[in-house]
Image (cartoon, rainbow, N blue to C red):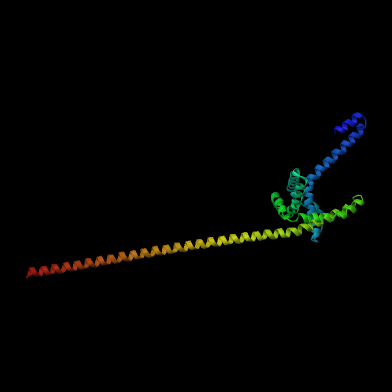
């Protein structure tokens, strides 16, 4: 803006040219901001369109705008990835490039799992690209020839090269995502097995405790029964002793009476 003002003061640029230049700058700036805002949702819709293309499913133009119901998530995902890439780029250019490859699959994952959080999509993208960054780089390098040919046509050829590359990137996502989901499923199965094993051990421990409690209760009942039998036997013995004593007393009384009578 200062250069424009100096040019106007020096007379090298008149006011009409200045206004036209400013209008062009503002239009480009507004379009750039607008593209950043809507590009996230458009990217998810374009991913869905290319997935249907790779899977030989029916293609519909409406698929390009089918993910505008995730507008907030798509915008936040794009802003976060840009922020992370810029933050890594402050260290050096190479860490920024590696970060760009690390988060490149986040839109694909979020489109395939709309209920997933943005943080989980970014983490899954990082995990998915472990060992696959070089493969994606080689895939991109393989399109250099096509890009050079497209540039020879003043960029018109990019209308064909761009969709071709995006479809190839979707196929690349399908290839590497199968291994990731297989590892995750294996981990889930392992966790489920461990949980089932722990639950079985807990159930066995509970059953053992119940069995021990039952045995204790049975022992208590047996002890109570034995105590009752002992009490009954003692009572019977006492009664018998009392009866014997009474009979002896009666006999003694009779004998005493007989002696008196004699």
Which residue is situated farthest in the top direction here?
Answer: 9
Residue 68 seen = no
Count of numbered labels shown in the rendering: 0
Instruction: Please identify the quarter of the rendering in which residue 57 is found.
Output: bottom right
Say above or below: 98 vs 208.
above
- In percent of the image, x 7 and y 69: which residue is there? 261
| Residue 81 appears left or right of 163 | left
Say above or below: 194 vs 154.
below
| Residue 96 appears left or right of 231 | right
| Residue 211 appears left or right of 151 | left
Residue 170's x, y, as percent?
Answer: 79, 56
Instruction: Please identify the quarter of the rendering in which residue 21 is found.
Output: top right
Which residue is situated farthest in the left direction here?
Answer: 262
Q: Quadrant of the N terminus?
A: top right
- In percent of the image, x 53 and y 62: which residue is there? 203
Residue 243's x, y, as percent?
Answer: 22, 67
Residue in front for this viewpoint, 65 or 117:
117
Residue 113's x, y, as percent?
Answer: 72, 54
| Residue 70 appears left or right of 162 | left
Q: Quadrant of the C terminus?
A: bottom left
Residue 152 seen = yes
Residue 76's x, y, as percent?
Answer: 73, 46
């Amino acid at each position: 803006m200062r250069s424009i003002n100096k040019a106007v003061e020096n007379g090298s640029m008149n006011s009409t040219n200045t206004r036209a230049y400013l209008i062009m700058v503002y239009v480009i700036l507004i379009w750039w901001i607008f593209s950043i805002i809507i590009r996230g949702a458009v990217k998810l819709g374009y991913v869905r369109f290319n997935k249907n293309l790779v899977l030989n499913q029916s293609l519909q133009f409406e698929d390009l705008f089918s993910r505008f119901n995730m507008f907030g998530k798509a915008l936040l995902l794009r802003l976060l990835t840009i922020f992370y890439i810029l933050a890594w780029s402050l260290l050096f250019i190479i860490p920024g490039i590696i970060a760009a490859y690390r988060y490149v699959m986040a839109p694909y994952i979020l489109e395939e799992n709309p209920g997933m959080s943005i943080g989980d999509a970014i983490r899954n993208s990082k995990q998915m690209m472990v060992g696959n960054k070089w493969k994606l780089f080689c895939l991109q390098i393989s399109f250099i020839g096509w890009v050079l040919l497209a540039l020879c046509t003043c960029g018109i050829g990019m209308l064909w090269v761009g969709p071709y590359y995006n479809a190839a990137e979707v196929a690349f996502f399908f290839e590497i995502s199968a291994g990731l989901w297989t590892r995750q499923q294996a981990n889930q199965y392992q966790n489920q097995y461990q949980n089932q094993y722990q639950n079985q051990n807990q159930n066995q421990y509970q059953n053992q405790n119940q069995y021990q409690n039952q045995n204790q209760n049975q022992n208590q009942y047996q002890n109570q029964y034995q105590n009752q039998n002992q009490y009954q036997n003692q009572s019977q013995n006492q009664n018998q002793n009392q009866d014997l004593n009474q009979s002896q007393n009666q006999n003694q009384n009779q004998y005493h009476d007989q002696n008196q009578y004699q």
